[in-house]
Image (cartoon, rainbow, N blue to C red):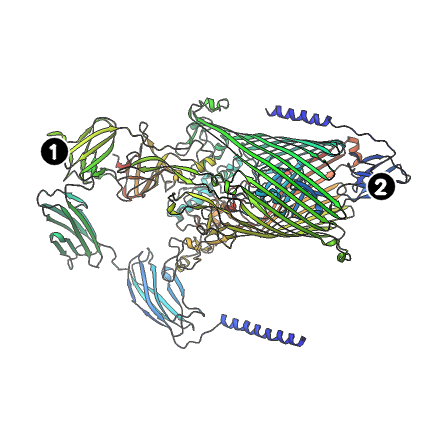
Amino acid sequence: MSKYIIKSIWLLAIFFCFSVSMLGQERIIKGVVVDSNGEPLPGVSIAIKGTTTGTITDVDGNFMVEVEPSDVLQFSFIGFNNLEVPVEGNTFLNIVMEESLVALDEVVAIGYGRAKKSDLTSSITSVKGEEMKTMSVGNPVEALQGKAPGVQVVAGSGHPGASPKVLIRGFTSLNLSTDPLYVVDGVPMGTNLNFLNTNEIESIEVLKDASASAIYGSRASNGVVLITTKRGEKGKTQFSADLSYGFQVFEKPYDMANATEYAEIMNQSLQNAGLDERFPDPASLGEGTDWWGEGVNKVSPQRNFSFQASGGNEKHRFAVSLNYYDQESFYNSGNWQKFTARLSSDWEFADWISAGVMVNPRREAWDDTPNWYQDYLLIDPITPIYRPVEEQAGLNEYSIYQRSYYTYVWNPIARDARQFDEGGYYALAANAYAEIKPVKDLVFRTQISGDYKFSHDDDFEPDFVIDGAHEKNEINYVYRSHDFNSYWNWTNTLTYSIETDGHNASIMGGATLEKWGYRYINGTKDGIPNNSDPLRELDAATENPEVNGNSSSTSIESFLGRISYNYLNRYYVTATYRVDGSSKFLDNNKWAAFPSVSVAWRISDEDFMSGVDFIDDWKLRAGWGRLGNQNLPSNVYTSSIGQDYYVFGPGEGSLVNTTYPSSMKNEDIKWETVEDINLGTDFTLFRNHIDGSLEYYQKKTKDMIFQLPYPNYSGYPDDAKIWSNVGSMKSQGMEMALNYHNHAGRLKYDVGVTFTTVAVEATDLPDITPVVYGDNEYTRTVEGDEPGYFYGYKTDGIFQNQFEINAHANEHGALLQEYAQPGDIRFVDVNGDGELNGEDRTKIGSPWPDFTGGVNVRLAYDRFDLVANVYASVGNDIVNWVKGDLYNTENSDNNVISGLLDKAWHGENTSNEYPRVSHTDLNQNFSRFSDFYVEDGSFVRLKNIQLGYSLPQPVLERIGLTKCRFYVSGQNILTITGYDGVEPEVSGDNVLNFGFSGWTYPVLPTYLLGVNITF
Amino acid sequence: MKKNVFSCLMVASIIFFNLLWGCDDDDGQSWSVDSDPVFQLASAEIHTEQGRTIRIEGVASDEVGVKKINLKIDDWYLDRDIQISTNDSLVKEYDLWYDFEVPEDAATREYTIQITVYNMGDRSVSETVSVYMDGDFVSPVLDLQNPVDGLTLAPEGEIPVEIYALLSDSRQLGYFVAKESSINFYDSISFMGTGALSYEYQYTATLPAEVGEYHFEFLLADSAGNVVSETRLVNASFDFEKMYLADVDTEEALTSDLFGVPMVITKTAPYNFEAQYYSEGPGTEIRFIPQTTSFSPHCYGVDPDNPDKLINDPETALPIVLDGKGYYRITLDLENLTYEVESYVPDDWYFEPKMEYPDDETYIETEYVGNLGIVGKGFPEYPDQNWATWAAIEFERDPENNYRFYKTLDMEGDVEFIFQPEHPWGWWPEPFWRFDSKENPEKTVLKGGDNVALTVPVRTTYKVTFDSHLNRAKVVPVE
């Protein structure tokens, strides 16, 4: 099937390529345009001054144009300074264009339109595709880290196919999703960009404040990320290939005890608990089994291949992009592959009408990558991998493994061998648009888009018995599911622009219709005759058939408008208004309106600034807007019935299968509303060598959604809840971007710094639940403090002797920790009431950083170039649950970290950090959530460093290429942190469980070799 | 103007520095005190024993303020400062009472605890408390074997009530009292001066031939004043509060179980009971008794002279014989001495594990319910089983009866358990069964009740039988 699709795509690509019509021109004067490095510049506009006659350079930078000797040629190209050259008697011109250091006239995407960057009145950060593609990543958002101020990207996990967590200017909701809205070429595309390859991206615009994103209304409260993909450009057809091959490295994260040391630690732990030692002669056990070495591959390859073709003429432009990415896992099972194609075609039928289409077939496939590397570390090193040969007779291939002698960790190599879960999808996105200009300056645009995704998941669990008591599956089973997601969107806009006497205005109005559909069916059966591959089908199974299926759909209808006006490009005002009606809401609040307004003042153009030479451009901005969050769980607007068994009837009664109302819809439920103000300034200084922006923002959420219990008199059971609009919170902060561009001789350099602060505060919580707990009460949210802070016990070192334990008592001698022994953790009686209990829990850390930032450097010297991206998160804390495994032997025989006997307390003043090892933990050293687990999570990470070399022009000409660049790069190869856990980039499912780190699949160093070719 | 500003700044600076110095003085304030504090101990001697908490009491006072009190005894690792006054808060009199647990390994000798009281001038006074390891804190043992609590006796005439108790103490018995005020029964014995360590008490009290409730009270004291007491309710009635089904033949079988034998049945109305019971095979013989440890004085069975009627006679009552294997419902009318027996097939819910995807972590997290097992402690064959659901001791399920579960295993020491499905992560999936009582369980309770908590002094092999339809469990020794 996949082969058929690939063939089809190639045929489509060939069709597009042949559809190019070639250009022909007369020749009077010839020339070539190159940049300051001597690289030819294709697509440079050349106009004869004072006329409409002109041409553009071809892919090699060559041009030909009919001129008079008195003519002056004007050369212009985005990103380069304009140049005027008199023709005079020349017949051939060598033109060298200088790059403009700051592209003020750069055009960026805004909601339902485009605008000059210099005209923006709101907070929008733009990152070019060229910057994104310097990293080879599975999810493009990962390459955004540190490049956009106000955007916090947290990897969370490094496993193949992982999707990072993105927070734009913090968060505005406690119970709903905090993911931003991703809009690709004008089409909302969910919350996961795995389907995109960085090579497909022309630019990414992050709409950060409400005045920018209010045009997306009820889905914009977490910010909006606009992705513009590459389209064809006028000019000779150009082919390019970007190929990289690399590998990730997974070093053993902790040095665990070998068999001898394990036995010594266990003996000591048992002895400390008053139990008998288990291993009479630890030394005789030797090194034992190296589980990590046997089961985890040290390196795993990564491939990223991308091919593009683009070109066109005045009437037709096209672009074809084929991309393949794969990442293997460190186990024998688990990997991720994706193939995406993007084919676009744009036609200019006449001055007044144009149209275009884009199709985006894509395929992702994965063998479910397990995340159980901790099992290779925690299983005891005494156990061999396989049972003795004589015990293997008669067992199936999944039962020949040895059950752990001393732990309840399942044999990880056995698990790896029976991992057959695999999934993926086939998807097709497409859009088509037409643009009509019925009268001058009036543009009507209609666009229809669709995205259809067929997902599948297959699993097979063989029967096996490794341990009859707990490590077994006595009957094999097979599972298969098919999901279908559909989405369509029809958008119509009408835009009228006016430019007269310094007054520039644009008025846009539009309407959209969107609908999402979802349906699924899955089935399982048990009892397949054997475990062989051909029989892993539902039809081959004989027992316990079970089938499930359901469907749902939601839709939104919206009306939107925007008015932009400026006078003399100096005084700006923009206003937007959107009205959304969502099927998610009931009649009482079906529709909501989201207005915004923003103003800007180019102060540098004022007369009183004429003497300030070092300021090239300086603009002040202010904006206000209202946004919504409609990502509600389904039981907000539907009532549901729960099921349970209860004992009813006379005497002792009998068990009865019962149903009860578990939740009721709220007829009055409505959007969470965010109101946002933004103050900012953009500046360019010192002859464009320095540019940047500085912003302050404040976002207030009201009508936050909480699940509240019913009052007792309602008759509903205790666990029945109703979602209600109560509560509010506030987030505010500063962000800064500062860039410096210059060159020293032949060394060109650009250095950019980004910096973001976020402070979030819960300002109002429901009276009925004034304290909101998360994650087993390990986090707490109260009015006046930041949401989701870590909530637990404070510690004060380790009891060094019995004197200290006896002194840790109230004034009447009651011991605060009556079960403590020397070597146990001392917990603080925070409220001073002479008792140690839950009331002594307090704020022990925060998952939210004081600031995040990035440093991005680009250097070029002759044919060499260097890119480096550094990302930092400072001031956040992390709960390192791994400590509970590495240092803890309480009621556990799992393996622990090497050297534990020295590291843990083993006598007075031997440690004030790690408690004694013991198989009993009556003092709750480990089971009490305390700041023992909380560590400073600050880190600085070298996200990417890439060194490139481009072949010189003569060599390129000999081999028929226009560009050939080789590079080596390293991603995530250096992380500086005091955090002792596996991975400092820690996220969470939601705001209330952020910052908890366990055995996360870490973000791994990746080393790559690559080449960029253009011809 | 400038002069004025300068003057203002000067004045402000002087005020600021004065304030600053003033603050410094406060922090380092020293107190001039001419007298020592006073400390009056409540008792300078304490008689105790190892592992027991002692209380040190006294009153500390000072005319300026008691700053702190230090309690010190190096032998017991105690060196504790109790802060009492601060510069901002002076306490002139402080009632000290401080509890401290004497270490278990303290030698049997005299110890001295030094208590030092400091006043705000850092003058001090010390007192010592002598601690002796000769306290008697062990209560005497009153082993009251007859009458059993709740004993119901038929008032066919005057009723003799046998009282039998074994009295003992680790040092010396004091006195014993037995009484029932409504019948003017009072008997007492004094052991003072005899040095008696044990005594066997026997007496026969007589109840009138009247229906009623009789509350017997028993009190035993040792020579140190430690007192224990017991009460017993004896009913003179034919309407028993509880009735038990006995499917065993001997009194030894009635008492050797951990619990569950005989099996409590349901009282449906005065004199009326209903039993639901699973017969494990044809020919099962059952009888009904209102007491748990003996077939006497009451035992209801089939009247040998009239098989349709019941008879209350331990000697002659014949067992009711259940013909087949399966569930039976037996109704008893003790007023009219009639009974009915019928078999039935239950159709209520039975436990089913959900463990199809043992490698699917989402499934394990949200839906997994393992096989039903025993979770608790006190099972020497299963050292990992210490309230660990991941190591649940799996029941053997009756292949012919979805409601029945069995497990034979050893128990020893403090035994606690519930019936709980296994979970590989140690979670506690529902449903689970606990018991109506920690120490005298008679019924299981679905998703409620208490953990059973019993003591098995000697390692013993038991068979645990659980019937989720009957909500009954029994634990009987295996030969």
Residue plotted at (66% across, 34% down): A446
Q: Is residue A707 above or below residue A450?
A: below
Q: In this image, B295 relative to A80: left or right? A: left
Left or right: A869 as drawn, with respect to B48: right
Res A21 quadrant in image: top right
Task: Give the label, 1 or 2, closer to the camera.
Answer: 2
Q: Nearer the viewer, residue B85 or A11?
A: A11
Residue A968 seen by the camera: yes
Query: Which one is nearer the viewer's eye here, A862 or A110?
Result: A110
**Circle on res. A50:** 2
The N terminus of chain A: image quadrant: top right
Look at the numbered disc 1 and give the secondary structure of its residue.
loop
The one of B476 and A528 positioned closer to us in this rendering = A528
Residue A460, visible in the rendered structure = no
To which residue does mark 1 refer?
B316
**Residue furthest right in the image:** A89
Residue A554 percent location from the top left of the image: 53, 36
Q: Chain of mark 2?
A: A
How far from the left and from the top, in percent, is residue A325?
62, 33
Foreground pick, A205 / A298? A205
The numbered disc on residue A510 is none
Q: Is residue A534 above or below residue A972?
A: above
Residue A41, by quadrant, is: top right
Q: Dot 1, crowdedness within 10 Å: few (<14), some or many (≥20)?
A: some
User: Residue A614 occupies which quadrant of the picture?
Assistant: bottom right
The three-letter code of the residue at mark 1 reads Thr
Q: CA distance from mark 1 to mark 2?
A: 131 Å
Image: B304 above or below A105? above
Amino acid found under the numbered disc labelled 2: Gly
Q: Locate the C terminus of chain A and report the quarter of the image it occupies.
A: top right
Mark 1 belongs to chain: B
